[in-house]
Amino acid sequence: MSEPKKKKHTIRNIIAVVVLVFILFAIFGQKSKSPSSDSTVAAASSPKAVATSTATVAPTPVPTPTAAPVSVEFQNALKKATSYANNMHMSKAGVYDQLTSEYGEGFTAEAAQYAVDNVKADWGANALAKAESYQTKQSMSAASIYDQLTSEYGEKFTAEEAQYAVANLPK
């Protein structure tokens, strides 16, 4: 007689644990979802809650700057531009040239332009990083560093970016 009771308690315990897991999943899953999906969950659980939430919360659509989706080529060019700008501290013109070069990445001019226009980079900081490298590793003077940073055969930074870099070199 004690064995059937034991089985009943074991089955109840398993069911209780499963129910508890589902409840915890539902609670923690709700916190990670966006507000729009919260109202969808509320709709499934309580029709009254949906009527209240839709009446009080009217999400405003946020306009996107570009209506057309970006092609894979443009996305890949942007990834490469980000890497060149933020890891190799290249200038905007240098990144563009690397992206379009037949010996570099071989992207179209349009994809490269999209990439340099949308990459998140601090070009002045990049110029300073290059300038510091020239100063410490090649023992170059400030004037030589400026020339190298602005040269069309060198780093291709703007005059303003190069001036910022030279002005902020360690003395």
Image (cartoon, rainbow, N blue to C red):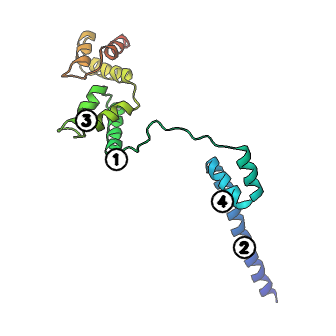
SS type, badge 3? helix
Label drawn at residue 72? 1
Badge 2: few (under 14), some or many (20 or more) residues near its Cα, within 10 Å?
Answer: few
Quadrant position of residue 77 = top left
Q: CA distance from mark 4 to mark 3?
A: 49 Å
Q: CA distance from mark 4 to mark 2?
A: 15 Å
Locate residue 66, reporting x and y percent. Answer: 43, 38
Amino acid found under the numbered disc labelled 3: Ala
Label drawn at residue 25? 4
Label drawn at residue 109? 3
Amino acid found under the numbered disc labelled 2: Ile
Look at mark 2 in the image and give the residue it sits on.
15
Residue at 33 percent of width and 31 percent of height: 116
Quadrant position of residue 21 = bottom right
* Depth order, front residue of 151/114: 114
4 or 2: tag closer to the N-terminus: 2
Give the answer, above or below, for where 148 lies relative to 9. Answer: above
Q: Nearer the viewer, mark 4 or mark 2?
A: 4
